[in-house]
Amino acid sequence: MARVVVVGGGFGGMAAAARLAKLGHDVTLLEQADTLGGALSTVGLDGFAWDAGPTSTLLPAVIRDLFRKSGRPLEREVDLQPLDLVREHRFADGSSLRLPGASRAAQLAAVDGLGAGLGQQWVDHVAAYGETWELLRKEWFERPFDDVVAPRELTALLGARESLEKRLRRTFRDERLRLVAGHRLVMDGHDLRDVPVFAGVDVYLEQRFGAWTVPGGLAALGTAMAERLALRGVTVLTGTPAVDLVVAGGRVSGVRTGAGELPADHVVVAIDPRRLPALASYVRRTMPAIPPVVCHVGLEGDVPDLPHEVVLHGDPLLVVRTGGRAPDGGTAWTVLARGRIAEDVLTALARHGIDVRRQVVARVDRSPRDLVERWGGSPHGVQWQGSRTARSRLGPRTPIEGVLTAGAHATTGSGLPFAGLSAALVAEVVGRA
């Protein structure tokens, strides 16, 4: 049995802790906040509740695998359900696209509504990611990367210099399709000129596997994970930030906190590694992807009937998410904004024809700085700065023996399924007790 300290109580850290505890290790998890979950938590006010971070996820198989391999199956803990509509896109010219998931035929028909032939262009673009996904899945997301044995196809893919913006301009004459293909990355804080083509694989995942959510809020998944840690006997120390790693002779021997040192045979870093001086020098050239402006609103009375997510293209780029919990007669929305924000977010929303300013009875605003300070880093991980970024992220192994990484800043990148995959890689490297 190895002593393992996991630094960070977001989804990646909790997933790594649960897996390692199930493998028989003595696991302690450190979290600087007073509660677990990180971005996978709830914001509440006056009877309203909103997901603090993501409201849907891709690749539900990753989450199912996590629960199955750490205890009870997911279906006995969380009601994860598919979304019929991934999102609605509304464009500056007045046109709109209601994009379904998990169906090539449905997407072809929906996109064709924007113009004859556009549907075929879209599904051809998505299909081009099929081989890319299989390569990444087998050799990057599900196997610890090793330069020595990595297949040439993978190293060539990771080193390709074409940007996603260039690929989209070459593929689509219609700007609306470029906006649809790139919007998730833009909302996560990336400039498409610096994003490698393979990072656009999410459109393939949406079409192939759909998008999934939990009625009432995806934060229920964070609650279930916290309960899983208790079931597996993980020692959880909240309100306990890690100050640095304790390293002797090139190998980790513990974690230093404000209350003293915790001895460890392995340390899993599930926070931004730049926050720990022992690791910071290895990632000094990386930058965090800054979160958007967030406005949680509780509304009363009749409000527009919107799908789970609506994207309003323009500057600023706005996203409305409607899956929060509200008292009887109320509605809970979250509005995200990115770009030139020269006015109140709800005023910008009203300019798109969705005016709920007089119906607001509860409101919580969070700036990007607020979010980073609250979560101890960006849940969107490392900002893309060209293809080299993929290999400048640490994980699962690091240059310090015994130190591994998981979560949004690790090799597999941000997003719930990819944080979950990073935890699986960590468990594979550490192995059974």
Image (cartoon, rainbow, N blue to C red):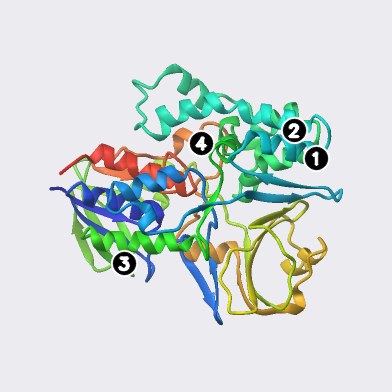
Q: Which residue is mark 2?
A: 119
Picture quadrant of residue 350? bottom right
Q: Earlier in the sequence, mark 4 or mark 3?
A: 3
The residues bearing labels 3 and 2 have C-alpha atoms spaced at a distance of: 51 Å
Q: Camera-side residue: 194 or 64?
A: 64
Viewport quadrant of the C terminus:
top left
Q: Amino acid at mark 2?
A: Gly
Q: Earlier in the sequence, mark 3 or mark 2?
A: 2
Q: Secondary structure at mark 3?
A: loop
Q: Earlier in the sequence, mark 4 or mark 1?
A: 1
Instruction: State the mark number for residue 389.
Output: 4
Q: Can residue 174 be seen in this snapshot? A: yes
Bin the neighbour count of mark 4 within 10 Å (Cα to Cα): few under 14, some 14-19, many 20 and up: many
Q: Amino acid at mark 3?
A: Thr
The residues bearing labels 4 and 1 have C-alpha atoms spaced at a distance of: 37 Å
Residue furthest left in the image: 1
Q: Amino acid at mark 4?
A: Thr
Q: Camera-side residue: 327 or 394?
A: 327
Picture quadrant of residue 326? bottom right
Q: Secondary structure at mark 2?
A: helix
